[in-house]
């Protein structure tokens, strides 16, 4: 499995400029969306999320996603979302790097109390010689 922390510091300056423009676009979209429709309405959204990693009690770093997305209903019992943008990869003790990333998911109400969900994701390395990382998850959620 690819580790997103291994690509830090291996990116050219030209890739950083492109990604900086991407980050500025995310912030511009955030500002535009903040004056748009309310949160209860399906449609565009902004998602900022940080995932930190630990091995035992040793901190290994964090990745912060800065994404713009869109979500909606699929009939009466299902929903979807897609989001993309930039991720700031910050390994412990090393320089941070900004890379493209995104994810998409589906949710389905199996019964009134049971839901199923799935998600696929990617995180780029910004370097053609380093593989992009991919992820997937499936799950069930039961409400008591």
Image (cartoon, grey):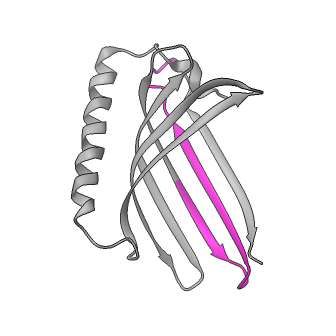
Q: Residue at x 57, y 39 (%)?
A: 51
Depicted 101 relative to depicted 47: above or below: above
Main SS of the magenta part reads strand
- Along the line of sight, which residue is nearer the eye, 63 or 109? 63
| Residue 3 placement, left or right of 63 | right
Quarter assignment of residue 60? top right
> Is residue 46 on the magenta stretch?
no
Tell whether 72 sits left or right of 131. Answer: left
Q: Position of residue 8 (x, y in %)?
A: 50, 18
Q: Is residue 70 above or below residue 12?
A: below
The spot of residue 56 in percent (x, y) is 78, 27
- Which residue shows up at 45% across the image and 21% down it? 96
Residue 33, given in percent of the width and then of the height, sits at 27, 60
Residue found at the far front of this picture: 57
Q: Is residue 37 left or right of residue 83?
A: left
Q: Is residue 71 above or below residue 103?
A: below
Is 132 left or right of 10, judged from the image as shown? right
| Along the line of sight, the residue nearer the viewer: 103 or 46 | 46
* Residue 81 drawn at (x, y percent): 49, 63
For residue 113, which quarter of the picture?
A: bottom right
Q: Residue, x 48% and y 32% (percent of image)? A: 124
How many labels were placed on the picture? 0
Q: Which residues are the magenta region?
A: 104-129
User: What residue sits 24% from the left and 68% below the top?
Assistant: 36
């Amino acid at each position: 499995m690819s580790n997103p922390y291994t690509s830090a510091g291996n990116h050219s300056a030209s890739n950083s400029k492109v990604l900086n423009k991407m980050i500025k676009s995310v912030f511009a979209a955030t500002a535009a969306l903040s004056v748009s429709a309310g949160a209860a309405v399906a449609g565009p959204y902004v998602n900022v999320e940080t995932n930190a990693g630990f091995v035992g009690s040793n901190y290994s770093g964090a990745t912060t996603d800065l994404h713009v997305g869109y979500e909606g209903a699929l009939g009466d019992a299902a929903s979807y979302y897609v989001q993309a943008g930039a991720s700031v990869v910050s390994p412990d003790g090393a320089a941070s790097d900004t890379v493209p990333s995104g994810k998409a998911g589906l949710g389905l109400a199996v019964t009134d109390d049971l839901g199923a969900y799935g998600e696929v994701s990617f995180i780029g390395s910004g370097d053609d010689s380093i593989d992009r990382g991919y992820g997937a998850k499936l799950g069930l959620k039961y409400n008591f």
